[in-house]
Every structure is written in C-alpha cells, then in structure tokens.
Amino acid sequence: MPIYLALLLFAGAILLISAFSSALQRKGLPGPLLALAFGVFVGPHALGVLSADVLGIPTMTLLEEAARLTLAIGLSGVALRLPHGYWRQHVRWVAVMIGIGMLVMLAVAAGVLWALLGLPLVTALLLGAIITPTDPIVTTPIVTGSLAEKNIPDRVRFNVSSESGINDGLGYLFVFLPILLMTKPDTAWSELLTTVLLREVLGAAVLGVGAGYLLGHLYRFARSRGLMEESSYLGFIIPLALVVLGSGRLLGVDALLAVFLAAAVFGQVIPQGDEEHQDRMDDTVNRFFILPIFMLLGLALPIGHWVELGWLPAVALLLALVLRRVVALWTLRPLLRSEHSRVETAFLSWFGPIGVSALFYATLAHHETGDPDVFGYVTMAITISVVLHGVTSAPFSYVLHRREQQRAERA
C-alpha cells in the first residue's frame, strides 16, 4: 500500500503544479522548488507519511538510478531544443565555456570550500567538481515556456541549454579525478587517462554521435515513406534516450554524455519543422520526469546531518555556487563579447543552478568513496540553488527583458 500512497501524493502534486504552472512561474515559484518543498513536507522531517525507502530500494541506489533516468530524458530534451545550425554558429561559446569555463568554475568552487571549511584539498576538489556543471534539468523551467520566450533572448536560452547539456556529461571526467585520487592514489592519473577519458568519455562520444546520426536518418526515412505517424515523435525521442542510456551502461561508457550527443546529432539530422514538437517534449519532461526526482530528493534530504555540520557549510556552499559562475563569466567576457551583451553576461553569471546532475554525482561519489559528508554537502548545495535560483528566475528575467529593450532603444 505505501507505493500507492506515494503514487497518489506524487501524481496529485504534479497535477496541481501543472494546472497552475504559468501563474506559479510568474510568481517565481518554478516546479522543482515546489516539488522539493512538497517532498520535505510529506517526508520524515515533517508529516512523516512517506520516506525515500517506500519502494524497498536502498535510498542511495534509488536516488542514483532515478537521477540517471531523469537526466537521460532531460538531456535529450535539452539537445533537441537547439535549432539547426546552432553548433556551427556558436562554436566560440561552447569552446570557451566548456574548454576554459569549467576549469575556472572548478577552481573557484573548490578554492572557496577548501579555504572556508578547511577540507582536505582532494575532498574540496570533489565537491567543487560536483557543483561545477550547470544543471540541464533545473534550467529547463528557467529557459522554456511563455515567460522565458518573452523575456529571455533566444541566444541566451540556447547557450544556457548547450552549456548545461555538455558540461553535465563532461562533469564525469572532473568528478572521477578526485574520486580516483581518494581510492587509487597510486594509479589515479593513468586510470583517468586510459579508463575514464579514452574509454568512457571518448567511447561515449563515438556511441552518441553514431547513434544520433543513424537514428536521425532512420527517422527521416520512416517519415518520408509515410511509415510513421506524426504523433509518434515523442514515441521516438524518449526511446532514443533510453536506448542510448542502456547501451552506454552496458558498454561501460559515460552514458549521459552519449545521450546528449545522440540527441544533439539527431536534432540536426531531422527536418527543422519537426522540432516544433519540442514544446510538447519539454512539457512532458517537466511534468513527468523533473518533478518526481525533486519530490524524492525532498524525502531523502539529510536535514539531521546538516544540523551536525553547522551553519558555516551553508555559507561556504552559497559563496561557491555564486562566485564560481560570476568569476568565470566575467573573466572570460573578453572572449565572449560577440556572443552576449553586458546585461546578458550578468544574467548568465547568476543563473548556473545545480540539481539532478549534482545529485547523481553525489550518489556516485558516495558509492565510490563511502564518505557521508559528500552527500550532505551536495544536497545542501542543491537545496540552496533550487531556492535561490528558483525565486529569482522570474524577476531577473523581467529585468533582463527591460534592460535589453532600453539598450535597443538607445542603439
């Protein structure tokens, strides 16, 4: 019976959030924030009617697999959000933010945590690597929907989407370096090069690009021959993500990076007009995949452990989350002037939320290292980010829209 109680409560909450989604978004109350609050409310720290082990699966295992599945579906939606020709037109943004930006954000985040919390350097590096990637799931409500389309320029929305998709997959490389330094210090660098980079990351790239290209042409063939109903678009995209995810796991490569690359290539191969269905894809992702994982996280938040850690970690994590993005964007602005105005850079330097990808890497790190503090720190950081970026998304997007209008009038 507990599983049906969970089904009732989760589905009921999703129905309510979906019914009032536009009004809630305008008030600065996006779905992930409300879903997280709902999970806390019905969980063991409030009403106590549900717990994270309701399915009889160990909490860490449940969170890891649920996060992996959510990311796979979400990443496919993010990749398909990008219009034809995007990657050629925005090579500079992708190269700078992924090639240099991630290193800057990692250095800033790890440095702040090491200096303020007195953590061992390798632990600070692990936490910094986990909170460095911008989360593709949490950014979805910020950069999609009528409010975002009205207030946020397309180039900002698309660049946030591409960055969050790629750096989420490449975060695997950054996270595994400190994990290997902790668990296999003698062979850490050789394993990082041979196992993680050459086999898992590059293998994921080959799998993703190949699968996306082949499945894209299969889609075109089926549509051109009248073998496929128009309504089958979603029925094609979601299985694509799951097929690549399953293949990546079986082959032992970075499956999430493979999913994003497969969807990105697929999106460039299929006809441009078919991407109009993407709005429905985002809707599906928001309602059926994003919200449940945050409800589940709300049930599993280690609030008692946070109390033991004290108030200083909250301050340090807040500073690390904010400064990593601000320092990176403004340091790299000379290389990105052609991409964004100063106002847009200010917006981008603020919105680098973390969420499901950080949860996934936290459970992975817990599994590999057995350090409970990592999960405690990361879930605290996720909660801070979901609240902070959630309540500021609407007002900051309004400010961006107004400033861009003023700039256009002066030009």
Image: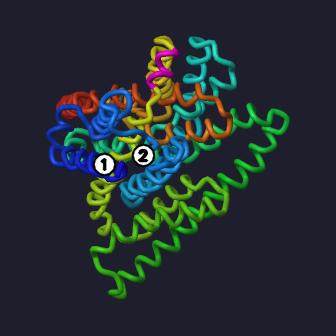
User: Compared with residue 380, is residue 401 higher up or lower down, i.e. above or below?
Assistant: below
**In this view, 50 is above or below 209:** above
Q: Is residue 408 highlighted in magenta? A: no
Secondary element at image label 1:
helix
Q: What is the quadrant of residue 47 in the picture?
A: top left
> On residue 5, which mark appears?
1
Instruction: State the residue at coordinates (37%, 27%).
Output: 45
Amino acid at pointer 1: Leu
Residue drawn 24% across the image and 42% down it: 148
Q: Which residue is mark 2?
A: 54
Confirm or deny contact between disc 1 and disc 2 (CB under 8 A): yes
Chain-order first, disc 1 or disc 2: 1
Q: Is residue 137 left or right of residue 277?
A: right
Quadrant where the image shows the C terminus: top left
Q: Tell me the element at label 2.
A: loop
Q: Which residues are magenta?
A: 303-309
Position of residue 238 measured from the top left corner of the image (x, y, whole percent): 41, 64
Q: Amino acid at mark 2?
A: Val
**Front residue of this view, candidates 44 and 85:** 44
Using the rendered image of the protein, determine whether residue 333 is visible from the camera's viewpoint.
Answer: no
Give the crowd class for mark 1: few <14, some 14-19, many >=20 residues within 10 Å: few
Instruction: State the scheme by which the image is colored.
Output: rainbow
Q: Main secondary structure of the magenta part?
A: helix
Relative depth, front residue between 174 and 270: 174
